């Protein structure tokens, strides 16, 4: 392996190991306490952009509407942020599972 590739390899290794941390830990409260809540997204619709990147999605979480995007071309840092869209709440409320 060439010396030019080593910094990139080290950076990839650091990012990989950083992803191994417990991402569901509680962000506040008592040290070592279980997360306040872990749940699933109720409904997702993905709309493909003309060139496929970034794709736009409507996500419903506990009856609330959010918009998000997929990653840009060649990025590996994860999806875009969730943006709250109150106008979608009525639609998302209809997608909640019974119970």
Image (cartoon, rainbow, N blue to C red):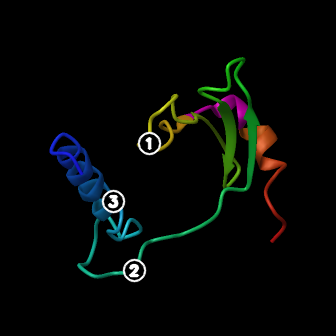
Up the image or down, 88 lies above or below 30; here it is: above
Q: Is residue 6 magenta?
A: no
Q: Position of residue 16 (x, y in %)?
A: 33, 59
Distance from label 2 to label 3 (Cα)?
A: 25 Å
Q: In the picture provided, is 47 more to the left or to the right than 41?
A: right
Distance from label 1 to label 3 (Cα)?
A: 11 Å
Residue placed furthest toward the top: 50
Residue placed furthest toward the front: 1
Give the quarter of the figure containing the C terminus. Answer: bottom right
Report the front residue among 86 and 46. 46
Q: Residue at x 78, y 39 (%)?
A: 90
Mark 2 surroundings within 10 Å by alpha-carbon count, few (fewer than 14), some (14 through 19), many (20 or more): few
Q: In the picture provided, is 36 more to the left or to the right than 86?
A: left
Report the front residue among 36 and 67. 67
Q: Residue at x 81, y 63 (%)?
A: 97
Q: Nearer the viewer, mark 2 or mark 3?
A: 3
On the image, numbered disc 1 is attached to which residue?
76
Picture quadrant where residue 34 is located: bottom left
Mark 1 surroundings within 10 Å by alpha-carbon count, few (fewer than 14), some (14 through 19), many (20 or more): few
Q: Magenta segment range?
A: 84-88
Going from N to C along the chain, the mark reached first, 2 or 1, is: 2
> Magenta segment, principal secondary structure?
helix
Residue 16: image tag? 3
């Amino acid at each position: 392996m060439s010396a030019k590739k080593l910094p990139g390899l080290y950076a990839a290794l650091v990012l990989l190991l950083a992803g191994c941390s417990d991402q569901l830990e509680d962000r506040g409260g008592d040290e070592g306490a279980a997360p306040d809540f872990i749940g699933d997204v109720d409904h997702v619709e993905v709309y493909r952009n003309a060139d496929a990147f970034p794709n736009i999605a409507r996500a419903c979480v506990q009856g609330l509407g959010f918009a998000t995007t997929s990653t840009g071309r060649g990025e590996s840092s994860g999806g875009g942020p969730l943006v709250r869209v109150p106008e979608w709440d009525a639609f998302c409320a209809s997608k909640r599972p019974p119970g």
